[in-house]
Image (tube, grey):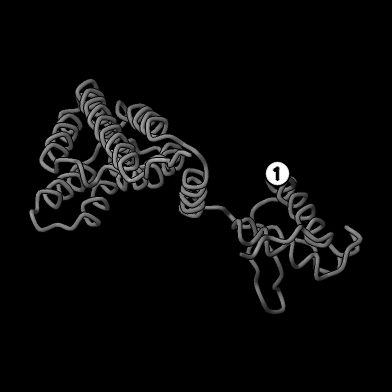
Amino acid sequence: MKTAHPATPRQDLSAQIAEAIRDAIVEGRMITGERLPSEAELSEQFGVSRSTVREALKRLAAQSLIRTQRGAFGGAFVNRLSFEAAYSQHITTSTLLLSMNAVSFETACEARYTLERACAPLAAHRRTTGSLATMRTEIARQSQPDLSDEAFCASDVTLHRALVDAAQNPVLSYQLAGAVEAMQPLMNMITFTARSRGEIVALHTALTDALEHQDAQAADTALHRLEAYTLTLGRDVMASRARNATKRTPPSSSG
């Protein structure tokens, strides 16, 4: 199996240069649309080769912090990071963090529903006919008897995304992207074989009804019920897996 090679000095330098430029952007010393110095100028400024500068610029471009433009007036420019781009990066990062680290089902469930309940009052107050229509559409889709497990899970994510977006706060939508579109699919992978679709549909309907009536307390109650049901499913599945693993373990021989 191949292992990662230690970072070379050039890679270390390119990371340091990228960090220095990123800090300048974050701190407002470089503004959106501003042209970065040329590769030659950056090479001289940091005392490194142009290839090292190019690696640093690639790092920044991968983070959507800069964009490159060709032509007589081309170069590297400070990019305006959109919520959409940040949202996508956040989902990827959250998914990797959850899948690569020992985050328990209970911890993920607690975090997700705590964050969603924080959105519920705003969502109840600000929901639109569009957000309600999205949730009703997903409930109807989830009620289809021939819907695949994969499609049901995707619909589940879409409904909860609509709940969060109903709060009409892009910062909240960004912050909850990891909870809804990273935690939820991973949790669904554990619970989908055990859950009752009818129960999920009923809980989703109660949540949507609460938003339609602008009843923040009822929305909070529905989310509490969803959390309790999800936790019960997860614990039951984990216990079943543990029992099956014990049965498959051969007895140790003595002597």
Vertical relation: 55 (above or below) 162: below
Q: Residue at x 84, y 62 (%)?
A: 42
Instruction: Locate residue 77 relative to residue 250 in the image: left or right.
Output: right
Residue furthest front in the image: 255
Corner quadrant of residue 215:
top left
Q: Nearer the viewer, residue 4 or 79?
A: 4
Element at label 1 = loop
Rendered location of residue 255, percent (x, y): 48, 39
Rendered location of residue 76, percent (x, y): 70, 65
Corner quadrant of residue 146:
bottom left
Vertical relation: 210 (above or below) 90: above
Residue 71 visible in the current orientation: yes
Corner quadrant of residue 27:
top right
Q: What crowding class fits label 1: few (fewer than 14 Cα within 10 Å), some (14-19), or many (20 or more)?
A: few
Q: Residue at x 74, y 55 (%)?
A: 18
Residue 124 visible in the current orientation: no
Residue furthest left in the image: 145
Q: Which residue was labeled with disc 1?
A: 28
Instruction: Locate residue 96 relative to residue 176 in the image: left or right.
Output: right
Q: Residue at x 77, y 58 (%)?
A: 7
Rendered location of residue 47, percent (x, y): 92, 60
Q: What residue type is disc 1 on?
A: Gly
Vertical relation: 60 (above or below) 139: below
Q: Nearer the viewer, residue 39 or 251?
A: 251
Vertical relation: 114 (above or below) 197: above
Instruction: Locate residue 219 relative to residue 255 in the image: left or right.
Output: left
Rendered location of residue 245, percent (x, y): 34, 42
* Quadrant including the N terminus: bottom right
Residue furthest bottom in the image: 71
